[in-house]
Amino acid sequence: MPDDQLSLTFAALADPTRRAILARLAAGEATVNELAEPFDMSLQAVSKHLKVLERAGLISRGRDAQWRPCRLETAPLETASEWIDRYRERWTDRFDRLDEEIRKLRRTQEEHDHG
Amino acid sequence: MPDDQLSLTFAALADPTRRAILARLAAGEATVNELAEPFDMSLQAVSKHLKVLERAGLISRGRDAQWRPCRLETAPLETASEWIDRYRERWTDRFDRLDEEIRKLRRTQEEHDHG
DNA sequence: CGGTTTATCAACTGATAGGTTGAATATAGG
DNA sequence: CCTATATTCAACCTATCAGTTGATAAACCG
């Protein structure tokens, strides 16, 4: 996957396990073991998911003795949400159809130009 | 990648080429060739990207002679945006720290229970 | 019909995702 | 120091991604 910020964020969100982890973290900090508990997979697998989330900037991690508490970071979510909202409202069908007509005309025009 | 709707949507968005395609489609319908034009990759590669977007429900495709016009579909964007917005607002740091204290206490308590 | 344009299908390739197991590291505490 | 707990590192496996090239399909046009 590409390593630009937005791609990293969306890629991190494209996995149910990671989304569940974020949902859990929205209720407050948690350790790796606490986060792993609900899942039917190894602790190491969860650790990897956390690394993905961290690389995407969606979580940060502290140090508390042997525990590495994770906390949610919302900045990338803001960015992602903004991107989506920019395109959420499509042109109306009416405009789309108009656009389609224009495209057809332009195509015909180009044929004239080349022929 | 998992094939649930939300994962498909986020995975489709996790690529700059596909996001650019969606951005272009927000301005109206376009054919595969038109969509491929700005990119330094084969038409087949773009065609594959379109298949990913279609599978995610982010575009739909018509039939106009040998052209297959693509149009943006916003429903999955709505869903994705809603998911993000649910977690965009994290607990305040104050609450996080309180939560952390509670966790520590609970840990101590469990140690007592087991010892 | 034969040729051109538009788009997809199919097979291949190199890189990465997401999981596994086993070993290593770091800290706390008797 | 020794051991238990929490977490990560490393090697490995399999499946999928994102791109390629070459062939194919479908519709138009002279």
Image: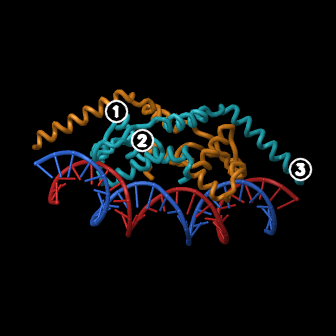
Chain colours: A cyan, B orange, C blue, D red
Residue A68 seen in the current view? yes
Q: Nearer the viewer, mark 3 or mark 1?
A: 1
Return the x and y of residue D29 as percentages of the image width and height. 83, 55
* Residue behind mark 3: A113
Residue at (33, 31) in percent of width and height = B97
Whether label 2 touches label 3, CB < 8 Å: no
Looking at the picture, which amino acid does disc 3 mark?
Answer: Asp
- Disc 2 with disc 3 on a shared chain: yes
* Residue behind mark 1: A27
As measured in the structure, the alpha-carbon distance from the residue carrying label 3 to the one carrying label 1 is 63 Å
- Describe residue C1's horizontal placement relative to residue B110 as left or right: right
Return the x and y of residue B17 as percentages of the image width and height. 62, 49
As measured in the structure, the alpha-carbon distance from the residue carrying label 2 to the one carrying label 3 is 56 Å
Q: Nearer the viewer, mark 1 or mark 2?
A: 2
Could you tell me which chain the residue with mark 1 belongs to?
A
As measured in the structure, the alpha-carbon distance from the residue carrying label 1 to the one carrying label 2 is 13 Å
Looking at the picture, which amino acid does disc 2 mark?
Answer: Ile
